[in-house]
Image (cartoon, rainbow, N blue to C red):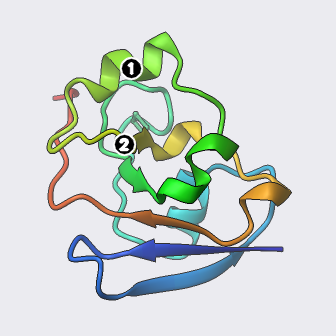
Amino acid sequence: MLKITFLDPDGNSGKTVEAKSGLTLLDIAHQFEIEIEGVCGGDMACSTCHVFVSEKFLDKIPPISEEEEAILQFAAGRKANSRLGCQITLSDELDGLEVQLPEETESLLF
Ligand code: FES
C-alpha cells in the first residue's frame, strides 16, 4: 500500500490515505471522498481532476502527453507542476506522493 496525501488548496491541511498501486489518483480521490470532481470519468476531456504535484515527485511520474497538455491548457490556475489526476497511475515509487488541490476547476464539458 502507498501513502498519498491530498493537500487542500491553502496547502495547510489535507488528508493522507493508503492506496493500491495500479489505480489512478482520480480513482483514489473518489474512493476516499476527496474533492476532485473528474467529470469525464478519466477520459481526458474535462480538466476537473487538475492537481499540483509536489516537486520531488515530478520526475517520478510519466511526462505529460500531448493530449494531457491540450487539456491542461484550460485548467484554471495552471502551474509548472499541474497534472491531470486521471493520468497519474500509482506505482510503488510514488509512495509518499503529495498533491495539492487547486482553488477551482473548470469543466470543458457541458
Ligand atoms: S477526469 Fe476529466 S480530464 Fe481527468
Q: Which quarter shows the C terminus?
A: top left
Q: Which quarter shows the N terminus?
A: bottom right
Disc marking residue 87: none
Look at 29% across and 77% down and name the residue there. 11
Indicate the position of residue 65 as horizontal and vertical percent values: 53, 17
- For residue 27, which quarter of the picture? bottom right
**Does dot 1 land on a helix, a strand or a loop?**
helix
Above or below — where is 15 with respect to 107? below
Tell whether circle 2 marks a residue whose Cβ is less than 8 angstroms from ligand 1: no
Above or below — where is 30 with respect to 64? below
Q: At label 2, which amino acid type do we have?
A: Ser
- State ligand 1's quadrant: top left
Look at 60% across and 54% down and name the residue there. 57
Q: Is residue 110 shown left or right of residue 55?
A: left
Indicate the position of residue 93 as horizontal and vertical percent values: 80, 56
Of 98 and 42, the residue lying toward us: 98
Above or below — where is 52 with respect to 76? below
**Does dot 2 land on a helix, a strand or a loop?**
strand
Of 92 and 36, the residue lying toward us: 92
Specify few, some or many for label 2: CA neighbours under 10 Å numbering under 14, 14-19, or 20 or more: many
Indicate the position of residue 3 as horizontal and vertical percent values: 69, 76
Q: Is residue 107 shown left or right of residue 6?
A: left
Of 63 and 39, the residue lying toward us: 63
Q: At label 1, which amino acid type do we have?
A: Glu
Residue on which disc 1 sits: 69
Tell whether circle 1 marks a residue whose Cβ is less than 8 angstroms from ligand 1: no
Of 60 and 72, the residue lying toward us: 60
Residue on which disc 2 sits: 82
- For residue 21, which quarter of the picture? bottom right
Specify few, some or many for label 1: CA neighbours under 10 Å numbering under 14, 14-19, or 20 or more: some
